[in-house]
Amino acid sequence: MTPDQLSKEVLSAARDVFTDRGLDPAALPAAAPLERPRNREHGDYASTIALQLAKRVGVAPRELATALADRLGRTAGVKSVEVAGPGFLNIRLEAAAAGELARVVVQAGERYGHSTALAGQKVNLEFVSANPTGPLHLGAVRWAALGDALARLLRATGAEVTTEYYFNDAGAQVDRFADSLLAAARGQEVPADGYGGDYIDDIAQAVLARHPGAAELPDPPAREVFGTEGIALMFAEIKSSLAGFGVHFDVFFNERDLHDRGELDAALGSLRGHGHVYERDGAVWLRTTDFGDDKDRVLVRRTGAPTYFLADCAYYYDRRQVRGFDRVVMMLGADHHGYVGRMRALAACFGDDPDRHLELLIGQMVNLVRAGTVVKMSKRHGTVVTLDDLVDAIGVDAARYALARYSPDSPIDIDVELWTRATRDNPVYYVQYAHARIASLLRNAAELGITRGADFDPGLLGHEKEHELLTALGEFPQAVTSAAELREPHRVARYCEGLAGTYHRFYDTCRVLPQGDEQPTELTRARLWLVEASRIVLANGLALLGVSTPDRM
RNA sequence: GGCCUCGUAGCUCAGGGGAUAGAGCAGCGGUCUUCUAAACCGCGUGUCGCAGGUUCGAAUCCUGCCGGGGCCGCCA
């Protein structure tokens, strides 16, 4: 029996009790709360439904709980139900009912843990969105790992997701980039507000290789060549780094397209139509203070030039009105949190509900730690730690895992020494090792000619360690759903670590394959089902994080 | 000054209102002639920053304060 099924049984028991006692069924929740108690003496599962309903229907909690326990205790597969404390229901399952979970998992395979919890939602998920004027630095990489994991999670829970990278290859930033390249190509000092770093020299040389003599052109055409070619080369490098990192974007959205398609005007018209646009000092403003922003924002400057903010409006308009996404999710670094107020106000100015149509996820900073000290980054001096640096230092799997295993609210120090270690304290190795151990066991079984067969006796999986493993496997779907709904992929990583530990403990205690001259038994087969189920869940969990599942280590 | 975020064991962190707050590391001591010891087992650790509030119940929600980090542009 899965937790989901048990929860339904609890609800159905509650419904029966309510009917018997003539209580109002409208007080019943949509789903019965079910949790896994910390303390194993409190059963396999516990429900607080009696505590939550008691007041609403005017029955003492323990009295309600007792009636529920009575009814629920007669359910097939339920071994016992006890009332504890103020009105907890402590539920234990029959070994056979618990063991059935191995079958559920094996039969579902790659789909185990997937659901339709977010079905029907059309989500635009924007992340990274770094302008191609330099390599991706550590902060952007956190979003690459987290955004990609989130996209996988949302898809696994049924949402329709488009991943998107928004960029701008025109404007002052690009001019500075072009000037820096040009200066490097001419062997001059980088301009004061320019970009530093070795990559500037590299790109400048690459441009020269394609356009010999470009550095000798007069400034305007030279700047044009270095700007256009430099951006193209830089972007190619970024895309190749992302591909190597296992991150794929459905759409690379160029801000310029918004201008070319007239969407800035369209967005402006729409905002005017909603009555939040006004003129002052010769500029066109959006009254974002109507919706909690700390000041109004300029849309069109006195000079007639649109602001970047108007492009933001147009980009939002494009996603909501033109392409019809239900929800726009944007992942921002903590240094951009100042955008939150204006972005939410912007959405409201289009008549949207910022709580429903727009979601701004803020992630804290990332540092790389070598030899116990933080590697300091400086854009000015070009000492940025890039995606490629990180991958070179600890590899793709460790990098993705390290970036995904912490709450986005928590700043991360990635210790190179830790994440390259092959021991228990390196979480990615610990989890992958569990998978490799299983794969090895399954190889050995195949060599011995032992298969798990078409069926097994779930009642044989009654050992304490087996029971714990089964319970852990049962928690996976809820871990996935909550990670997706809360936009917190680290929950999946933490779940995987817990499961890996539970598996290692099972493995340590419960021999699976026969030794010496022993013959395989029904228990051997039952355990092979459990082992395969464990492998599937570890693989599904790591897949959601974009981390590989090695068969050998 | 305003806004965001964090504050949980010596360290790094988990804990989306539930029971006696948990993992790893660090420290000490155990377990491999047989399925991967990259593992497992045992021992110790807490004013959950402080003070109020909501609740049958708060590390969790609300308010204030203290402390760390970050951000405030007719730049892009």
Image: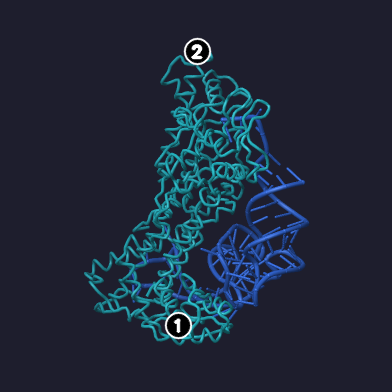
| Label of residue A216 in the image | 2
Which callout, 2 or 1, points at the residue further toward the start of the chain? 1
Bin the neighbour count of mark 1 within 10 Å (Cα to Cα): few under 14, some 14-19, many 20 and up.
few
Image coordinates for residue A227, horizontal then vertical, percent: 49, 23
Residue A236 visible in rendering: yes
Image coordinates for residue B74, horizontal then vertical, percent: 65, 30
Image coordinates for residue B12, horizontal then vertical, percent: 60, 57
**Measured along the vertical axis of the image, is residue A358 above or below residue A378?**
below
**Is A512 left, or right, of A224 in this rendering?**
left
Name which residue lies at 31% across and 67% down.
Answer: A106
Q: Chain of mark 2?
A: A
Instruction: Give the colour of chain B.
Output: blue
**Measured along the vertical axis of the image, is residue B66 above or below residue A342?**
below
| Label of residue A189 in the image | none
The type of residue carrying mark 1 is Thr
Are discs 2 and 1 located on one and the same chain? yes
If the image is split into quadrants, where does the C terminus of chain A sit? bottom left
Name which residue lies at 56% across and 83% down.
Answer: A59
Foreground mark, 2 or 1, reads: 1
Question: Disc count in the image?
Answer: 2
Name which residue lies at 52% across and 52% down.
Answer: A356
If the image is split into quadrants, where does the N terminus of chain A sit? bottom left
> In terms of secondary structure, where does tag 2 sit?
helix
Image coordinates for residue A493, horizontal then vertical, percent: 47, 59
Look at mark 1 in the image and give the residue it sits on. Answer: A19
Q: Which chain is cyan?
A: A
The type of residue carrying mark 2 is Glu
Between the residue at mark 2 and the residue at mark 1, the CA separation in whole angstroms equals 89 Å
Does the residue at mark 2 contact the one at mark 1 (Cβ under 8 Å)? Answer: no
